[in-house]
Every structure is written in structure tokens, then in C-alpha cells.
Amino acid sequence: MNPKTPLTSKRQKAPISLSSILSDLEKRAPEATAEKWDNVGLIIGKKDESVSGAVISIDLTRESIELAKRLKFNLILNHHPCIFPKGHGVSRVCEGGETDLIYSAAAAGISVISVHTNFDQCALEVPMKVSEALGFKALGRLYAKGELALTKFAVTVPETHAQALRDALTEAGAGKIGSYDSCTFTVTGEGTFRPREGAEPFLGSRGVLERVAEVRIETVFPRGLRKQVLKAMRAAHPYEEIAYDLFSVEQSPSQVGLVSGLGYGVYGDFATPVPFERFAKRIKEVFGIDGFLMTDPAPKKLKRVAFVAGKGTSFIESARSAGCDLFITGEAGYHDAREAANAGLGVLELGHRESELFFLKTIEVWCREWGIRFKGLNTPVQRFRS
């Protein structure tokens, strides 16, 4: 346990239910934005419980369970899922063995929630706070090679309701391209329909062919926001039956701009080039580390840098294409880092857990907003021993 991390929010507001926290997490980091192989959301527990407090940690560990029990907290918020990957095929949960921690949490009445790649893609607080702490201006995000992350959406609506529908779509996260938002395209036309028996039409009468001046609105949204966008569309659309289309987009998203649900990490520029040695000191201060792994030779001066928490191997090419001098991540792997260095991109590895410090900081802020007591736990998985 980190002795410098205080127990906060000692005076808790009226108890909040686990279902309310899950509902808010779905707004902040929708589960559908997680990668297909990921396993996020409520992994242990029941939704109708009141939350007495939360331990926040990168992983489910023996220490996090014992701390929750000691503080009488009944929730652990993890970054890494305790059952992983999705479809892990756990056949039994019992004391001892690989499922012992899961059994121990459940036996103690402790619920466990994981927010992982959905958090990494949606929590824009992290790229903003990282860039602020390291002293560069955030410009955009990084994408894995070949990632198809966008969905194109088209819907027809009466002209009288077009603007209200546009507003609803953009409020739900659609229409963000690079540094722009509210991006839509509209074309006018005529819609026809004949309400049949049992229909409750907004316009027209049963059995009569209706002709209506309609517009077709087109936009794009991150694929993981499909549920939210369609829900917003249905709420704002006056028709009983709605004509709409969804298309996969092969075009890669713009690397410019911070869009929730699209991309990972952040890249950006310093106002003036920064000597590497000075920046290295800043890195150690911000992430609370004594050292890091760095490809050789290190860049002498830095103008543009990129950061991705955790395992950032698949984002090296994206950092290169963005014109970065240095790529900061948790772990990259020897050969991938060496290849990047040969191509002129320095790679700095903080350590996987160490790089995810801002997960803990962000969830702490969210806990304050929920009005629950919490304790952050940043336990090393590995330690240097002599």
C-alpha cells in the first residue's frame, strides 16, 4: 500500500447503489467501446447493493482484497479484468488455484468492476492530464495498424425535426472528425409510406399513401458508441418506424483531435524543443519512478512526443506516422523497440503498471463525484531485488 495515498471522502453522502455507478460508467466509458477480446464491467457482485466504499487498483490482488475488508469497503475498481481475456473459459471458481482471488472477493461480499480498453479509449481526462503534466500540447491520438474504428450512419427524418435530430446525434458522440464536431451532411428528398392496420403514424392516416418532405442526415461515430447513438436517434425521431443505415468505414480516423471512443493515448508538441535529459527527469517525477528503459541513442531534443499506457507495441507505427521523436509507453518489447529506434523513433518504457498511474488518478476523481469513500492502491507486480 502506498502510505502517501490518503483515505479520502471520509464523510460519505447517502449510499449510492452499484447499479448507479455502473450506469454512470456506461456514460463515461461505454462497454461497447472495449476491444472484442476484453472483459469489462461488473465481473463479481450484484447490482442492487449499496456501495460502502471502493479500493482502486490496477489489478485484483490479495492486498486489494484485504484492504477492502479492513476498510469495510465492498467494491474494488480495477483496470485489468480479473477474468481475462473474454471467453477465458473459467470452469470453476474455488479456494486455491488460479481463481482463488475471485473466490476470496466473492466470499467477502466484495464486488469487482473492470474498466479497461473502454476506459483507455473514452476517458479523455487521461490524455489531457498526461500532456499537461509532461508539458506538451495535446494534438491527437494513436491507432493500431489496420484498425477500423468508425461507423457511417444515415437516417431520414421530416424536415421539421432535422435540427433536433442532428443535435441529439452529436450530443451522443456522433459527428466528431479530427478537431471538428457536429459534422453532418444533409440532402433533401421525398419520403413515401402507407400506414397499415395497427400502425400509429406520426403523419398520415391508415390506408392512405403519404408523401413527406424529408431530409437524409449522414454522419460518422466511433463504432463503440453505436448503442448510445441509436438510442439518441430513436428518442429524437418522431416516426414509429425509422429508416436508417449503418456502414463500416475503411478509412482510418484522423489522428488529429481528441475524440472519446476513438484511439488510445495522446501525442503532442512542446512549445519549443526540450532536451531529452531534462524531459527524462520530468518523466520520473510525474510517474514516480526511479528509472526506465530507453532505446539507444536517445533523441537529443524533443519536439513531438506520444504516450500510450500499458502495452503500446501496436501503436509504434502510429507514433511514427504522426512524426514523433519519442514514444512513451508501459512496455513495447525488445525487437519492436529496436526496429522503431532504427527508424528514428525513440522508445521509452516506464513499466506496465507504472504507465497506468493516471487510471488511478482519474477513477479517484470519479469516486469523489459519486460521493463514495475510496482508497487508491498502486502495488508493484515486480520489484528489483539484489
Image: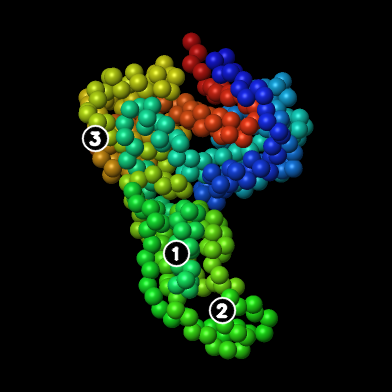
Say which quadrant the N terminus sits in: top right
- Across and down, in percent, residue 77 comes to 61, 33
Q: Which residue is mark 3?
A: 344
Residue that appears at 27% across and 31% down: 270
Q: Residues within 10 Å of mark 3 (few under 14, many from 20)?
A: some
Sequence-earlier tag: 1 or 2: 1
Residue appearing at x 56%, y 70% in the figure: 238
Whether label 2 touches label 3, CB < 8 Å: no
Could you tell me how far apart the alpha carbons at marks 3 and 1 are, in whole angstroms?
48 Å
Q: Classify mark 1: residues with Cα within 10 Å, few (<14), some (14-19) or many (20+).
A: some
**Helix, strand or loop status at disc 1:** helix
Q: Secondary structure at mark 3?
A: loop
Question: How far, Cα to Cα, is label 2 from label 3?
Answer: 63 Å
Q: Residue at x 45, y 26 (%)?
A: 351
Mark 3: which amino acid? Gly
- 213 up-or-down from 273: above or below: below
| Disc number for residue 163 | 1
Label 2 crowding class (10 Å Cα cut-off): few <14, some 14-19, many 20+?
some
